[in-house]
Amino acid sequence: MLNGLTDQEQQVKNWLATQGDAMIELLAELVNTDSGSYDKQGVDAAGEVLKRYFVTQGLALETIPQPQYGDQIRATLDHPTSNDRRPIILMGHRDTVFPKGEPKRRPFRIENGRGYGPGVCDMKAGLVMNAFVLAALKRFGGHPGPVIALVTSDEEIASPSSRPVIEAEARAARAVFNAEPSRVGRKITSGRKGGVFSRCEVTGKAAHSGANFKDGVSAIEELARKIPRFHKLTDLAPGTTVNVGLIGGGQTVNTVAPSAWCEIDLRYVKTKDRDQAVAAIREIAETCSVAGAKSSFTIKGEFLPLEQTPEAKALFDLYEAAASVAGFSVSAEFTGGCADSGYTAAQGCPTLCSVGPVGGKAHTPDEFLEIDTMVPCAQALALSVMRLKEGVLPPG
Amino acid sequence: MSLPTFETQSMLKGLRRWVEIESPTDVPEAVNRMMDAAESAYREAGARLERVPGRDGRGDHLIARSPWGEGEAGVLILSHLDTVHPIGFLERLPFRIEGDTAFGPGICDMKGGVYIAHEAFARFLRGRRSPLPITHLIVSDEETGSTTSRHLIEQEGRRAKFVLVTEACRDGGKVVTARKGVGQFEMHIRGIASHSGSRPQDGRSAVRELAQQILELEALNDVKTGVSVTVGVVRGGTRPNVIPEEAYAEIDMRLPTLALAEELIPKVLCAKAHREGVKVRVTGGLNRPPYEKTAKIAALFAHARKLAAEIGIDLQDVSTGGGSDGNFTAPFVATLDGLGVEGQGAHTDQEQILISSLSPRAMLLFRLLETLS
């Protein structure tokens, strides 16, 4: 042992240190493969880029086909002899929020140590890191049980098709590391809010605003009455917020609006707060005060909160120690942003989120990745996986 | 001289030709084909013609004048030949006759009215002489607010002693003696964007501000005064998980009197944001002034009512919320509107007229031209 590292740990760490250029090469190809959440063809093409890499590394692949969104992909590194058969999951999504053609407009590029391009940190760099960690473990061994890289297809739209796959994996798993980007200053995530994304549709009655004004029922007026009531549900003390993020409605300026709609984003901290908040939103959405107006409410998507548990804390401690071997120190902070890690945590699986390379400005054209963090983050993750032996985590 | 006859079948045949020339406002070459047909009809009858070239994506306007009474204040017949229906709508709504009803795009709004007015005017061009000179102004853009014709309408209106507008009549044959003024506005709101999950406290929602603005606008509705406000279109936000930076609304306001317009329009234009960091900007204003039933207009209606009685029509008048080009002239010259044909379903795929109204309505226009002095 050198510096307290086992031979295998040292080999893995050293090999990853030589893979910086290869990581960037794979990342460039992945960023330049257009993969907006609703573009199944593109998301699957991005999946192919990763699959090719897994195949060259001799890893077993499984594709779980999806009719509407991109397929789910699992690359498995088995461990036939371990007592604990529960796999360790390295999780990531390959869809992006960007419209079709974005990589053509903004292909991957590096400037002053930062990588740019759609999805560069959120979270294609994380996927590349996961792939190289799996490859390193395949090459040198030292993992305490099966390791699975799970590559999902639709996180940016609240994981409609990947959620059941993620939850099934989480129920069987020992722990989950989610490769969302860590934040500038080496901050990873200690907890996340839950989110419920819903839509309210209002129906009124069209009429000419001049000649038949009195025959009309304005769906826009009804919507305008609802919006302040939705916002009043915000209560910052427990961390509950409601945002009416998108609205639309009406036909022409001189027609009483026959229809209007809004999309509502609810965030909450504690699982116990969810049902009450959703019920309050539903009540406002479904009850109309403009005579003759009707409305409906649908939940379009949902993320569960990532709540802090003793197991998650133990996982953080393990990661923190591994990070210090890789040459950096980390801290954890709470965020209101949602991610797939909420699903795995809700299944009772110890989950650490935001272990991906450092980045920021996600979902904007200024999204960036700190290139030099790719290798150390991969090293820290690999060492964490290798050290996740029986008894390291408190019994759940 | 005895009264002329207005033969229904021949007018229906001519009107059919006009209906089958589609003329949506935003296709100027199509509107110009329609104007060509009207121009050649007037040329044959012997009118003095002026064609005012279209601009800003709109078609030409046509002016037909009587050869007599040049320079004197006369009667202005005010019409439009553009329609709201797009090209190809004729396949969905072909000209057809069912009993006493004829269907077709623009047949009611307002090709029927233009057609009978031209028939009435042509009777004078072909050998009679009216006490006052007659001008028929046919514009190409009424359905989109008459932006390229307004000055022409006002200019001809100022020269006239009476204005007769050939919009379709209302509710079983009523003519129009008052219309509300029309104000139209755009409201742009700018707030501050932020992520609704991680930084909700940093944002200022433009959508939330817009909702408050809409509620204040709705509060201006007043059944008693007849003021109505419609927020017809709204948009706002980019993604559900972003506090909206921008929101937008289109507002339509109907104002029965100039006094109400002067009181309420500044209120809309000066809307202020309710929260710091949010900006509200409103553009627009009075698009058509109120058309109020003045004493002169009441007298013109009384005259028309007497003429109508002679041909067996019990003429009633009505005020309406819908604007027309009559709004532009009514503030300064006696204007009578709704002198076109009887019909319904304007702007829809059921647009139709009552065939049996063609002849009496043509006669009423003829009698007005014959007697106004």
Image (cartoon, coloured by chain):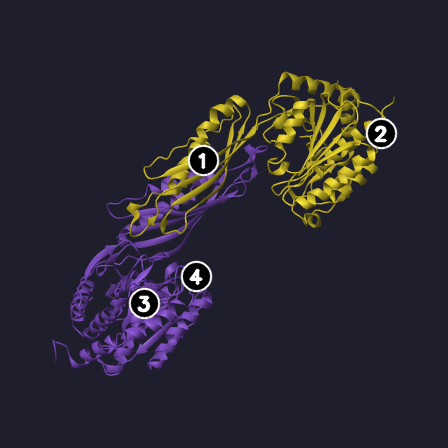
Chain colours: A purple, B yellow
**Where in the figure is residue A174, as x and y percent of width and height?**
24, 71
The residue wearing badge 3 is A125
**Amino acid type, label 3:** Ala
Question: Which residue is found at the position 72% from the left and 24% from the top?
Answer: B75
Q: Secondary structure at mark 1?
A: strand
Specify whether disc 1 shares its chain with disc 4: no
Q: Secondary structure at mark 4?
A: helix
4 and 2 marks in contact (CB < 8 Å):
no
Q: What chain does badge 3 belong to?
A: A
**Amino acid type, label 1:** Val
Is residue B148 left or right of B191 when viewed as pictured?
Answer: right
Cα distance between the residues tagged 3 and 2: 85 Å
Q: Secondary structure at mark 3?
A: helix
Question: Which residue is found at the position 12% from the left and 79% from the top?
Answer: A2
Cα distance between the residues tagged 4 and 2: 68 Å
**Amino acid type, label 4:** Arg
Residue B48 quadrant: top right
The residue wearing badge 4 is A105
For the question of whether residue A202 can be seen, the reply is no
Specify whether disc 4 shares its chain with disc 2: no
Cα distance between the residues tagged 1 and 4: 35 Å
Cα distance between the residues tagged 4 and 3: 19 Å
**Amino acid type, label 2:** Arg
Q: What chain does badge 2 belong to?
A: B
Q: What chain does badge 4 belong to?
A: A
The residue wearing badge 1 is B282
The residue wearing badge 2 is B126
